[in-house]
Amino acid sequence: MECYGIGWCWWTLKKLDTISGPLSVPISAAYQKVLDYWNGAAARPAEGDAHDGLFGMAADLSGNVVVRPDVVAMLTDRNAGAIARPFRSLNIPGTIPAADYDIGNEGVSYHDAVSMQTQYNGPIWNSGWDYRNDGADIGASSDPQGFAYDVGWTEDGEWLSCTVNVAQTTAYQIEARVASAVDGGRLRVYLDGVPMGADLNVPNTGG
């Protein structure tokens, strides 16, 4: 549009709890009651509950905002999709959440077998649809170690890339937190495109 002199504007808060906008605001339980009533899924809330839901949501818009760095990068950096860039600062030694892989297009920062919707109202193409607005399958996690999200529904050949800051050159031990409902899973770790050691077996954890 810019090439033809056509102006455009991104609606930063058209949607509240979203992964496809640059800013997201969690929907509170009180506001959800109002939404359920508007959508015909619940009885009319009491006046006080409606007030708390609406004005509480308005207050959250000024102080409870989550920035979506991947969406911001795609809007502001012309090379964001073509070049892998860090999603967050990841340090070694340290913990690297799988869902914090680099920002970039499919085939640049990640590979997923079904990475986009190719037809309107077509089949579900993202099994988790949380946290990030791209093709990797990310879902909310109940991991007891405190990880908020996990990358799941993994198929053969899928991968993620992470840019990391290494504190010093030395030998590091890698531990991976995994889950699987089947036998025979394997995980491979690369450093700058070179495999590090042998494949790691992913056991059948029952979930």
Image (cartoon, helix red, strand yellow):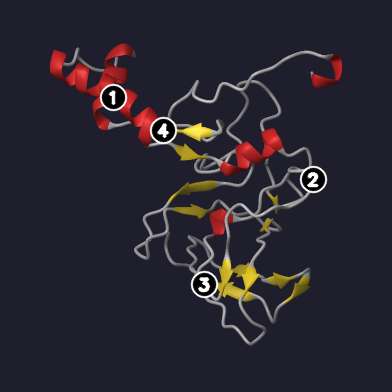
From what the image shows, is residue 190 above or below residue 77? below
Q: Mark 3 points at which residue?
A: 94
Amino acid type of disc 4? Val
Q: Residue furthest bottom?
A: 171
Q: Mark 2 points at which residue?
A: 82
Q: Earlier in the sequence, mark 3 or mark 1?
A: 1
Q: Mark 1 points at which residue?
A: 31
User: CB under 8 Å between callouts 4 and 3?
Assistant: no
Which x, y percent locates residue 34?
27, 18
Query: Which residue is rendered at x = 71% and y = 58% of the image?
Result: 157
User: CB under 8 Å between callouts 2 and 3?
Assistant: no
Secondary structure of the residue carrying tag 1 is: helix
Secondary structure of the residue carrying tag 3 is: loop
Q: How many labels does the image show?
A: 4
Q: Earlier in the sequence, mark 1 or mark 4?
A: 4
Q: Earlier in the sequence, mark 2 or mark 3?
A: 2
In depth, the one of 16 and 122 nearer the eye is 16
